């Protein structure tokens, strides 16, 4: 049993009104080790020592959420994700009375009191996500922490390739709206500059630790960059073509050719430089 409720409201349902892509836990987990490193680097900078309540927003398949329970064995851990498939996969990491998972809309999550909030690679899907910060900061207990990580899409060649091909004459009718919508790989990405995040949270009274890191992943196999983004940033585009299998195959082939040019394979594999923004704010 949970000692006390610490969440007032979580919007239920697959997307709960949030425009988000479909998710395939198996595809997402194909690069589990590479995706785990930013999560570990983010949470390692959280100074809160003995939190009672920890919430992992956009928890995905729950693999990394489980590591929070290892770090803070006396804390109650809640993982929230909009995807039913992800929450179903996360259920195997649940521990009665310690770790649980719920379907919910991050935008509608409204905590009463919480010690640590983690949002790893989820806020890039939420337009104007910085409008959520005041409520989250107000709910933090003394010595609490807000920690989030987002991919930096500005100047990232993958986002340019997705947008350019989706907006081309061949695909514009089907995918032009997806390319123009706010999202992590769109021309209207909601991700802010790292200095904007640091300034905004500092003005709310947090002690802020903010930085950028570019991870250089060495990927193996044919078209590994396409495979990587098939589980993340390419999903909004492929979702729009899911009922047209031939068109979907053609679109993926066109994307794959462009990605091979931007990230040429080498005898040892393919290098994927991936820039990310990290922010950890402590209260009190």
Image: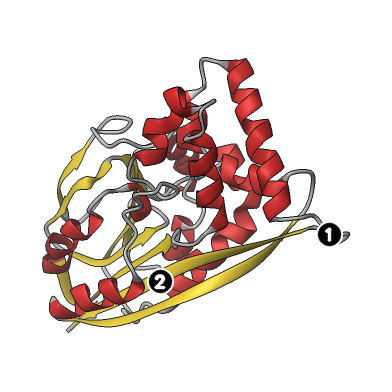
Q: Give the quarter of the image for residue 268.
A: bottom right
Residue located 55% across and 61% down the image: 36
Count of marks overlaid on the render: 2
Q: Position of residue 31 (x, y in %)?
A: 64, 52
Residue located 50% across and 69% down the image: 40
Residue 84 shows in the view: no
Q: Mark 1 against mark 2, which lies toward the viewer?
A: 1
In the displayed structure, 115 sits above or below 91; it is below
Give the farthest residue toward the front. Answer: 169
Q: Which residue is mark 2?
A: 278
- Alpha-carbon span between mark 1 and mark 2: 30 Å
| Residue nearer the viewer, 60 or 256 | 256
| Residue nearer the viewer, 45 or 141 | 45
- Work out which quarter of the rendered image holds the C terminus and state it: bottom left
Residue located 47% across and 66% down the image: 276
Horizontal side of 91 relative to 75 (left or right) equals right
Horizontal side of 128 relative to 166 (left or right) equals left
Q: Position of residue 27 (x, y in %)?
A: 60, 39
Residue located 51% across and 15% down the image: 243
| Residue nearer the viewer, 178 or 167 | 167
- Looking at the rendered structure, which numbered label has been put on residue 266? 1
Residue 82 shows in the view: yes
In the displayed structure, 65 sits above or below 280; it is above
Secondary structure beneath dot 1 equals: loop
Graded by Cα atoms within 10 Å as few (under 14), some (14 to 19) or many (20 or more), the crowding at tag 2 reads: many
- Looking at the rendered structure, which numbered label has been put on residue 210? none
Secondary structure beneath dot 2 equals: strand
Q: Position of residue 114 (x, y in %)?
A: 20, 64
């Amino acid at each position: 049993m949970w000692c006390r409720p610490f969440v007032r409201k979580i919007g239920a349902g697959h997307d709960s009104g949030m425009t988000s892509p479909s998710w395939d836990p198996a595809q997402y987990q194909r690069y589990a080790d590479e995706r785990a490193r930013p999560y570990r680097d983010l949470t390692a900078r959280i100074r809160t020592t003995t939190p009672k309540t920890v919430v992992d927003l956009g928890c995905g398949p729950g693999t990394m959420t489980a590591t929070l329970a290892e770090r803070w064995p006396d804390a109650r851990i809640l993982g929230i994700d909009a995807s039913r498939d992800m929450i179903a996969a996360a259920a195997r990491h649940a521990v009665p009375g310690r770790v649980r998972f719920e379907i919910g809309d991050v935008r509608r999550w409204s905590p009463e009191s919480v010690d640590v909030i983690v949002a790893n690679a989820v806020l890039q899907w939420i337009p104007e996500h910085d409008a959520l910060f005041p409520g989250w900061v107000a709910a933090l207990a003394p010595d609490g922490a807000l920690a989030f990580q987002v991919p930096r899409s500005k100047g990232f060649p993958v986002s340019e390739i997705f947008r350019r091909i989706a907006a081309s004459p061949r695909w514009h009718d089907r995918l032009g709206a997806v390319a123009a919508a706010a999202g992590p790989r769109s021309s209207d990405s909601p991700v802010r500059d790292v200095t904007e995040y640091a300034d905004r949270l500092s003005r709310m009274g947090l002690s802020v630790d903010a930085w950028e890191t570019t991870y250089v992943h060495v990927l193996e196999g044919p078209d590994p960059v396409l495979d990587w983004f098939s589980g993340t940033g390419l999903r909004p585009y492929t979702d729009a073509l899911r009922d047209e299998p031939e068109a979907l195959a053609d679109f993926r082939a066109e994307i794959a050719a462009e990605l091979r040019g931007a990230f040429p394979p080498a005898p040892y594999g393919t290098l994927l430089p991936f820039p990310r923004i990290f922010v950890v704010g402590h209260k009190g």
